[in-house]
Image (cartoon, rainbow, N blue to C red):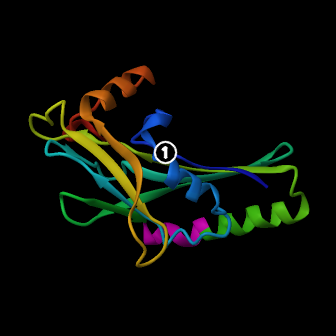
Amino acid sequence: MKTAVLALFFALTACSAVDPVTLMRLSGLSPLEADPGDFEVIAHLPDGLDLPDGGAELSLSATRGDQSLEGRYILERRGAAEARRLRVAPADLVPLRRLQARIRAWEAVDPDGTTGSMSLSITACRTGAGPDPDDRMSAGIILEPGGPERPLLRPVKVRRYEEMLAETAKSGVKACTDVP
């Protein structure tokens, strides 16, 4: 199966912000074999930014001919305020593993005709007066239980994050109270 792994960012698309070493490591992982319960994303946000409930999700999709499969799974926020830890919600692990199994079955039948992707979307929101535009935000990922945190999103200024959101037709960073 041809797979595009982890098209991330805090709801943005600036490839230069993603750590290339970690991206290479992720590209070697099979989204069909990796246990999604092992991954943990850590969002490092400055004061004035937070993660809304439901603001982070993992998507897994595949196509074969005119058929397609897709699942979206909420990442739950965990951990201290200075390092937000995100994992697939326990209720979503079984459906996600079932989708992986269905896509593996497709791949077994038609390995060259099956394509897939895994993506991660994290959306930050403002709290209070919001962050200083020159503060930096970043993200890391842990790929296996007890493993090291690897850089995923290199430190980027909040100002640049908001510019990237504007470039992708988003309205900018919303106040957390305005996020449904």
Q: Specify whether 42 is left or right of 129.
A: right
* In the depicted structure, whether residue 174 falls above or below residue 66: above
**Is 120 covered by the magenta stretch?**
no
Q: Residue furthest left?
A: 129
Kind of residue at badge 1: Leu
Q: Residue furthest right?
A: 109
User: Residue 176, percent across and down?
Assistant: 22, 41
- The total number of labels drawn is 1
User: Residue 75, percent across and down?
Assistant: 41, 59
* In the depicted structure, whether residue 146 falls above or below residue 158: below
Say few, some or many: other residues with alpha carbon within 10 Å of mark 1 (under 14 / 14 to 19 / 20 or more): many
**Is 95 covered by the magenta stretch?**
yes
Per the rendered image, the range of residues in magenta is 89-96
Please name whichever residue, 59 or 19, is drawn nearer the observer in this view of the structure: 19
Q: Is residue 69 visible?
A: no
At x 28% / y 48%, what residue is drawn? 52
* In the depicted structure, whether residue 47 falls above or below residue 12: below
At x 48% / y 73%, what residue is drawn? 144
Per the image, label 1 sits on a secondary structure element best described as: loop
Please name whichever residue, 152 or 60, is drawn nearer the observer in this view of the structure: 152
Q: Residue 149's quadrant in the figure?
A: bottom left
Q: Specify whether 95 is left or right of 160.
A: right
Split into 4 quadrants, where in the image is the C terminus? top left
At x 14% / y 45%, what residue is drawn? 47
User: Residue 72, percent across and down?
Assistant: 54, 53
At x 18% / y 45%, what residue is drawn? 46
Q: Specify whether 58 is left or right of 108.
A: left
Split into 4 quadrants, where in the image is the N terminus? bottom right
Q: Residue furthest bottom?
A: 146
Which residue is denoted by mark 1 in the rendering? 8
